[in-house]
Image (cartoon, helix red, strand yellow):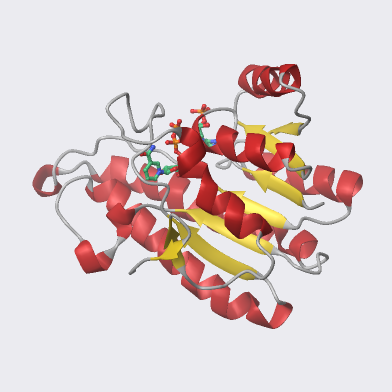
Amino acid sequence: MKTILVTGSSKGIGYAMVKSLAAQGHQTILTGRTAEQVVTAQRELSQEGIKTDIYVLDILNEAQIKSAVEYVDKHYGKLDVLINNAGIFPNAGNSEFANLDVIRETIETNTLAPYRMIQAFLPLLKKSHDARIVNVSSKMASLSSMNGGAPGYRLSKTALNAVTKIFAHDLAPYGISVNSICPGFVKTQMGGPTATREPEEGADTACWLATCEKSPTGKFFHDRKEIAW
Ligand SMILES: NC(=O)c1ccc[n+]([C@@H]2O[C@H](COP(=O)([O-])OP(=O)(O)OC[C@H]3O[C@@H](n4cnc5c(N)ncnc54)[C@H](OP(=O)(O)O)[C@@H]3O)[C@@H](O)[C@H]2O)c1
């Protein structure tokens, strides 16, 4: 049984990750920035016979991150898997006239907050014998197929992929794996109703990386297959 924390998991793909991992018997910590949503999500899972711990965590709030680390340390003494799932997709406008403040906010949430989460939880990840970090990115981040549109989102997720590569290298001596995944186009608040996949399908690759026997590191995956950066 692994102890697994998923950010932004009171709804969407993160919720599907917690549901799947907790149903497999792992100790999950469902987190989100709204207490009411976090408690509601825990109750919904409980009604299906699935147990999860919860913690209110806004990944932009340094004090809450520090408290979350203390909470996990006190209750579990280590963290086996950190899934940086929380993300935003605000409309910054097209690249020519894009609002740089919106781009900056997007990078704060999608890139720097996962970076801070990794730094903060590192002491607890180092206490695990098989620690893993999964960063939820997007194919829209791939430089090999980079296109126009959504400049803030693309920049933030390409930079998140760089975070993956940097930490995969620097944490290799500790045996900590770090990978990025793309969930595909998923029916959530972000993906909208026209998206093609269910949250469970979007959650699958991160759940696989969290629990597979021997994790790869420094790679980018979609549907359990490696894809180009
Ligand atoms: N849906 C897609 O088609 C798609 C495609 C590629 C990649 N992704 C990625 O998949 C991940 C999950 O997205 P989703 O589709 O499940 O979207 P979603 O339904 O909008 O869920 C996003 C989650 O992130 C949380 N969040 C945002 N800012 C946060 C913060 N500062 N602190 C804590 N939580 C925060 C949201 O919390 P609130 O409930 O408080 O807003 C929400 O729980 C994201 O990283 C997204 O970029 C999604």
Tell me: 158 left or right of 42: left
Residue at image coords 38%, 30%: 187
Q: Is 124 rendered above or below residue 50?
A: below
Q: Is 213 rendered above or below residue 210?
A: below
Report the front residue among 90 and 11. 11
When asked about the image quadrant of residue 222, the answer is bottom left
Q: Position of residue 129 (x, y in %)?
A: 81, 69
When asked about the image quadrant of residue 88, the answer is top left
Q: Position of residue 116 (x, y in %)?
A: 59, 56
Report the front residue among 227 and 166. 227
Q: Is 224 rendered above or below residue 35?
A: below
Tell me: 192 left or right of 201: left
Give the quarter of the figure containing the C terminus.
bottom left
When asked about the image quadrant of residue 133, the answer is bottom right
Q: Is residue 8 visible?
A: no
Residue at image coords 57%, 35%: 16
Residue at image coords 34%, 38%: 89
Q: Position of residue 106 (x, y in %)?
A: 37, 44
Report the front residue among 100 and 45. 45
Q: Is 47 rendered above or below residue 89?
A: above
Q: Is residue 94 visible?
A: yes
Q: Position of residue 174 (x, y in %)?
A: 72, 77
